[in-house]
Amino acid sequence: MTKYRNRLPQLDGRLFLTDGGIETTLIFQDGLDLPYFAAFHLLREADGTAALADYFRRHAAIARANGAGFILESATWRASADWGARLGYSEAALDEANRKAIDMLHGLRGEFETAGSPMVISGCVGPRGDGYDPGAAMTPEQAQAYHARQIATFAATGADMVTAITMTNTPEAIGVTRAAQAAGMPVVISFTVETDGRLPTGEPLWDAIAAVDGATGDGPAYFMINCAHPSHFAGQLAEGEAWVGRIRGIRANASRCSHAELDQATELDSGDPVELGRLYRELRGRFGQINVLGGCCGTDHRHIEQICGHCKLAA
């Protein structure tokens, strides 16, 4: 079932897409109930499972139609122990939900993958705490222990890689990386940044990347930036800096609002898909290694279509 674990095709530099803001799309556009933003909770019912599959199909079809690769990112951002317990899941039930999420992606890969559009299955890991606020950070050892079970389930279910989305602090990112290394899984770390381009802890992005690489022997296959508008971090990226070369992916927000403003919002801010596509093209033009492109809060298939269309011009 594992297809690309030994060599991730996105490392060869071709354009790869991924999906948009899955939780905001399912809640605000599809009208679904996601307690704690837990998309995996939909897998407990046939209708919810079908809604998730339809969501991924919309995005995978864009990649196939444009001859781009695609990262199938599992709907498991909240499917770790603490969040599962809040939703009433036992350890065994949570393991089964993680397996079911990956099994769905195997089916979708069989449906959509072509020679021109390779599709990589990624097990999505979310933070133990909030995606905006680091709270009381774990030690790397505590983080490794916390995330190990979910990552081991992904490995056993045939995922190609692990992606840690909305990492807010370096100790947790180090722990996730070590857990993935122990499971023999390629791992990607995607950091959340604030409007100043720094992590929610205040740590500069370059320091966070250096800390994770230093503690794990350059463990991540690459790094990503997510859950911020490009205007929040583009100015922090400087040509020729070695740490910038470690960034290969972007999953930006549609909105220019801060995390605090988004937390208080009662309506979804979808921003301007065309403008977002242009900003991605500018980043790709400056940094050619950035080739894994998707969205975060407020984005949907319209934004991915614009990102793809604009970035094909910068390839």
Image: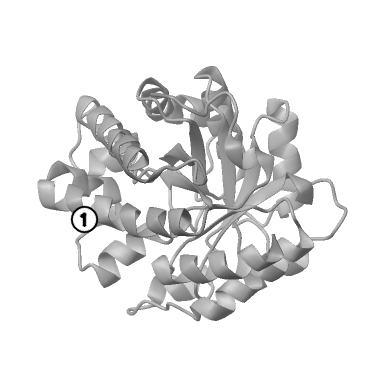
Residue 16 horizontal side relative to residue 284, left or right: left
Q: Which residue is disc 1 drawn over?
A: 51
In the depicted structure, whether residue 184 falls above or below residue 313: above
In the rendered image, residue 118, in percent from the top left (x then y), is placed at 50, 41
**258 or 221: which is nearer to us?**
221
Q: Residue at image x 36%, y 76%? A: 268
Q: Residue furthest right?
A: 240
State whether residue 35 appears in this view: yes
In the rendered image, residue 95, in percent from the top left (x then y), is placed at 27, 28
In the depicted structure, whether residue 44 falls above or below residue 295: above
**Image quadrant where residue 88 sits:** top left
State whether residue 196 appears in this view: no
Q: Quadrant of the N terminus?
A: top left
Q: In which quarter of the image is the C terminus?
A: bottom right
Residue 216 horizontal side relative to residue 178, left or right: right
Local SS, label 1? helix
In the depicted structure, whether residue 134 falls above or below residue 230: above
Q: Residue at image x 19%, y 61%? A: 33
- The amino acid marked with disc number 1 is Ala
Q: Which residue lies furthest to the front in this view?
A: 115
Q: Residue at image x 51%, y 67%? A: 253
